[in-house]
Image: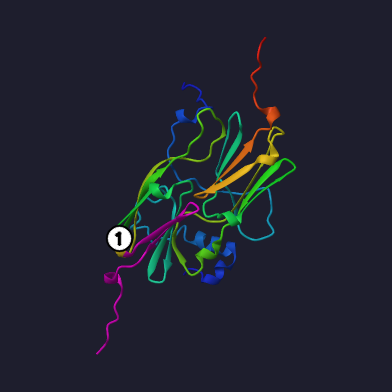
């Protein structure tokens, strides 16, 4: 029996880069034709807050929408497929499409201070914990 | 044959066109390392080819492209970092080194190859070598 992997420490987990088949978005119908994909996402938590790292290759800043409503953060990235005009596919290994995913947030998140950064097709959402939810050291008298 | 550009008016049209080539045999004989990272799509643009690959989170400076004859080699490293004290709740992104070669059915002019990486998508323009272009023979 191998020991239970320590999920709190990603550095101890071996990993190999492989092609991940894109998952199609389910459970929600779109009014426009075309497939949406679920972006690969990492979620990690530190003392200061929660960070979401979302991979949306091909989505530029102006085609990205992040909204927060009733405790649900929703990310939608639109692909500008006009770039594909005038070229014909001859060999393909992956399909392209828009991206959408939502996450429900706990009350501990300071909703007014959410920050977003997009770099190399990766969106990093920083959700700070509200001051009341941060760990505190209690002095013992 | 591939759909004409009008099919790209809708996302669905593009997706269907891409799907119809997932089973294409166009490159089968020459493609090495098919299914390796990063996934690539190859398009025809007039006489030239365009290779597009999705590599989100890979910095420009971490990608190396080499072209020789009919082969394009894409190599590099993708890293995913977490702060030391972070508790990871969900882990879907993969990291590591990659190195793959794609053999094309035409000769490429290595001097005119252009590559750009934007928003995690790598696009390499592969112009057909002049020596590879068909010549029209005048019938006398």
Q: Residue furthest right?
A: A70
Vertical side of B109 occupied by B134: above or below: below
Q: Residue at x 60, y 65 (%)?
A: B10
Q: Is residue A6 visible?
A: yes
- Placement of the C terminus of chain A among the 4 image quadrants: top right
Vertical side of B79 occupied by B87: above or below: above
Q: Residue furthest bottom?
A: B140
Q: Is residue B138 magenta?
A: yes
Q: For this view, does A59 lie left or right of residue A88?
A: right
Q: Is residue A8 magenta?
A: no
Vertical side of A134 occupied by A87: above or below: below
Q: Tell which of B87 and A90 is nearer to you.
A: B87
**Residue denoted by label 1:** B70
User: In x, y percent, where is residue A9?
Assistant: 50, 27
Q: Tell which of B109 and B86 is nearer to you.
A: B86
Please, what secondary structure does the residue beneath circle 1 have? loop
Image mark 1: chain: B
Q: Residue furthest top?
A: A141
Q: Quadrant of residue B136?
A: bottom left
Q: Residue at x 69, y 50 (%)?
A: A28
Give the colour scheme shown: rainbow
Q: Which residues are magenta?
A: B112-140
Q: Quadrant of residue B45?
A: bottom left
Vertical side of A100 occupied by A130: above or below: above
Q: Is residue B108 visible?
A: no
What is the tally of numbered marks visible in this picture?
1
Q: For this view, does B101 lie left or right of residue A46?
A: left
User: In x, y percent, where is residue B108?
Assistant: 31, 64
User: In x, y percent, where is residue A113?
Assistant: 66, 40
Crowding around mark 1 (Cα neighbors within 10 Å: few <14, some 14 to 19, many 20+) is: some
């Amino acid at each position: 029996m191998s020991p239970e992997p320590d999920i709190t420490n990603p550095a101890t987990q071996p990993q190999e880069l492989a092609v991940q088949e894109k998952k199609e978005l389910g459970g929600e119908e779109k009014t426009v034709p075309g497939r949406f994909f679920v972006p690969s996402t990492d979620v990690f938590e530190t003392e200061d807050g929660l960070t979401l790292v979302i991979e949306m290759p091909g989505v530029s800043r102006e085609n990205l929408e992040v909204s927060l409503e009733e405790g649900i953060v929703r990310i939608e990235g639109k692909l500008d497929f006009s770039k594909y005009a005038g070229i014909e596919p001859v060999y393909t290994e992956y399909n392209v499409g828009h991206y959408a995913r939502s996450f429900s947030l706990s009350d501990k998140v300071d909703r007014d201070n959410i920050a977003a950064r997009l770099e190399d097709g990766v969106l990093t959402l920083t959700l700070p914990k509200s001051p009341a939810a941060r760990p505190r050291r209690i002095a013992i008298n | 044959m591939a759909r004409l550009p009008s099919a790209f008016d809708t996302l669905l049209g593009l997706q269907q066109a891409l799907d119809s080539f997932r089973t294409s045999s166009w490159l089968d004989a020459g493609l090495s390392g098919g299914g390796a990272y990063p996934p690539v799509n190859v398009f025809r643009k007039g006489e030239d080819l365009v290779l597009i690959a999705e590599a989100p989170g890979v910095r420009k400076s971490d990608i190396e492209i080499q072209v020789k004859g009919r082969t394009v080699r894409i190599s590099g490293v993708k890293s995913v970092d977490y702060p030391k004290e972070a508790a990871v709740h969900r882990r879907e992104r993969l990291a590591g080194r990659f190195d793959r070669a794609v053999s094309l059915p035409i000769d490429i002019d290595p001097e005119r190859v252009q590559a750009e990486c934007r928003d995690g998508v790598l696009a390499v323009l592969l112009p057909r070598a002049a020596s590879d272009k068909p010549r029209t023979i005048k019938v006398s």
